[in-house]
Image (tube, helix red, strand yellow):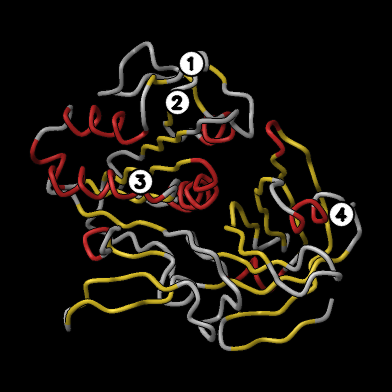
Amino acid sequence: MTGFEQGTIFLEDGSVLQHELLPANQYRLRLRAPSIAASANPGTFTHVRCDESLAMRRPMSIMRVDAQQGWVELLYRKVGRGTHLLSKKTIGEVISLLGPIGNPFAVSNQVKRPLLLGGGVGVPPIIFLADRLRQRAGLSSLLVLAGSERPFPFSPQPSRSSIPGIPTDVIASMPLLDDWGVPNRLATLQGFAGCFHGYVADLAQIWLNSLQAQQRAEAAIFACGPVPMLQSVTMLAREYGVSCQVSLEEYMACAVGGCAGCTVAIDTDEGPAMKRVCVDGPVFEGDRVIWP
């Protein structure tokens, strides 16, 4: 392995350990990258060189890490030339990674009922956060709600447990989270069996409605997904008086703050300012984002 460190960001050659095709042209990619694995936190991402023939890297959220075994896992969808070339990588090949980049989710000790919301390609960092939080003592509950309008990158299965506040006919769950013992449910408008028919924010509202005032005071929302979803979730959090952190997705060139090509408008204490999603984010307080 070769690599160097720049602050807390590593340039690391990651060797492919597993590469699996999933439904709807989605792929799960596991790479040996011990430096990044040891430093990554939920919400951070990697900048991936999909192929040596391409000058531009692609930003990809980190879905799982194992610091002891030294691997990171990414989930991506094949949509363009870069990801098409990446999808051809086989076990043993080396892929250049830059990471972990960005500010992660921050879950204070006062939060006893974290509600994690993922939409589409925004699901991976939510899985990472769920993995980290399931090991935390003192939580009253942990709930993950994920939505997608294309086939999920896993085979949904009926959950082995019920969730207070969630309609009893909504039983579809993510097998990995179920195996971890993390309560979770799925939402879609595509009529997938066992899923909630609607947006993930709609299902979140049903759950928030079921809480008593004291329970709601212990709740906080952590979300990643498309902009319309994050905007709806922010409005929902404001309505229920719940704090909300959102992880934004933007096109990036350098991903280390140099080009300022991924800026978004944020309401700071000094007034509106343009902030870089790559290094000032990708996680921001939802109420601070000036939505389009």
Earlier in the chain: of badge 2 and badge 3, it is: 2
Residue 85 on image: x %, y %: 83, 55
Q: Which residue is mark 2?
A: 188
- Residue toward you, 152 or 31: 152
Mark 3 is on which residue type?
A: Pro
10 Å crowding of disc 2: few (<14), some (14-19), many (20+): many
Q: Which mark is residue 89?
A: 4
Neighbours of disc 4 within 10 Å: few (<14), some (14-19), many (20+): some
Picture quadrant of residue 232: top left
Within-10-Å neighbours for mark 1: few <14, some 14–19, many 20+: few
Q: What is the spatial separation of the Cα atoms under label 4 and label 1, in whole angstroms? A: 34 Å
The amino acid type of the residue labelled 2 equals Thr
Q: Quadrant of the C terminus?
A: bottom left
Residue 191 in the image, given as x and y percentages of width and height: 48, 16
Kindly indicate whether the residue at mark 2 contacts the one at mark 1 (C-beta within 8 angstroms).
yes
- The residues bearing labels 1 and 3 have C-alpha atoms spaced at a distance of 21 Å
- Type of residue at label 4? Lys
SS for tag 3?
A: helix
Q: Is residue 28 above or below residue 208?
A: below
